[in-house]
Amino acid sequence: MARVLADIKKSLSHNKRLLAVLIDPDKTDLHELPRLMAQLNSSIVTHVFVGGSEVEAMVTEELVSVVKKFTELPVVLFPGDVTQITDRADALLFLSLISGRNADYLIGKHVQAASVLSDSDLEVIPTGYLLIENGKETSVQKVTQTTPMRRNDIKKVVDTAKAGELLGHRLMYLEAGSGATDPVDSKMISQVKEALSIPLLVGGGIRSKEQLNIAYEAGADMVVVGTALEEDESFFNELK
């Protein structure tokens, strides 16, 4: 039953700030998951995202199965490839990299996934995905062979996000990339949010509660963090 998107919209209607933690199966020790999930369960985290740019087949399914044993939080796939799709999760962000012009990540991968998803109970959420320049080359940029949108070309980012909404995407995601030097600029977040009537997700380069609050104040409905927790688990203490 489709619930994740409906719950996101309901939470936002009550002005609740949402926070997702992205777990990369390639960088996560399964034996450490019980402790990690206990930390997440005691924090302000509202969603668990699972995915990575390059993950071997079946690794994601195994990780999601373990995660589901230790949390009641919604587990949402954030896949870098078709091989990361598993019915064990609650939902799938069906990402279309609308900031780039690589046909594989605009529609090609989706065609490959169509037959798998037609027989699946996963809630599929069409999501526009915009990679934003951040000061360094990211794994997403390398894998997709696409150029991030420039930080100073806010109008083009806004127009691209709006085009994604008009095409039917249900969520919009501004992504600075894993390990980003700089998070998405607050002015860009504000202007994109103003142009949209769908929920806005923002991720990449957020390493402190201050940066988290800047993103929220600018208009992010959900913030996604990942590398910050990999590099500094004390960040959890700021999220109690």
Image (tube, rainbow, N blue to C red):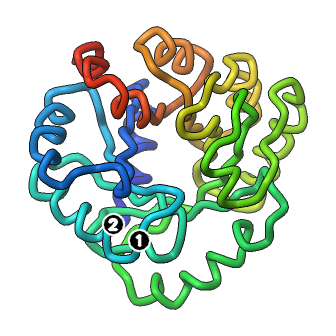
Q: Is residue 121 left or right of residue 81?
A: left
The residue tagged 2 is 60
Kindly indicate the quadrant of the structure image that contains residue 97: bottom right
Q: Is residue 114 left or right of residue 146?
A: left
Residue 196 is situated, as x and y percent measured from the top left of the image, at 71, 38
Residue 129 is situated, as x and y percent measured from the top left of the image, at 66, 51
**In this view, 212 is above or below 62:** above
- Mark 2 element type: helix
Look at the image and tell me in which quarter the C terminus lies: top left
Residue 23 is situated, as x and y percent measured from the top left of the image, at 35, 47
Are there few (<14), some (14-19), or many (20+) residues within 10 Å of tag 2? many
Q: Nearer the viewer, residue 162 or 138?
A: 138
| Residue found at the far top of this picture | 210
**In this view, 166 is above or below 117:** above
Q: Nearer the viewer, residue 26 or 158?
A: 26
User: Which residue corresponds to the image point at 30% horizontal and 54% vertical from the top-left?
Assistant: 75
User: Which residue corresponds to the image point at 29% horizontal and 13% vertical from the top-left?
Assistant: 238
- Circle 2 or circle 1, nearest the eye: 1
Kindly indicate the quadrant of the structure image that contains residue 127: bottom right
User: Which residue corresponds to the image point at 41% horizontal and 60% vertical from the top-left?
Assistant: 77
Q: Is residue 136 left or right of residue 16?
A: right
User: Which residue corresponds to the image point at 70% horizontal and 78% vertical from the top-left?
Assistant: 108
Are there few (<14), some (14-19), or many (20+) residues within 10 Å of tag 1? few
Residues at discs 2 and 1 in contact (Cβ within 8 Å)? no
Q: Nearer the viewer, residue 186 or 53?
A: 53
Q: Amino acid at mark 2?
A: Thr
Q: Is residue 152 left or right of residue 121?
A: right
Look at the image and tell me in which quarter the N terminus lies: bottom left
The residue tagged 1 is 56
Kindly indicate the quadrant of the structure image that contains residue 235: top left
The count of marks equals 2
- Mark 1 element type: loop
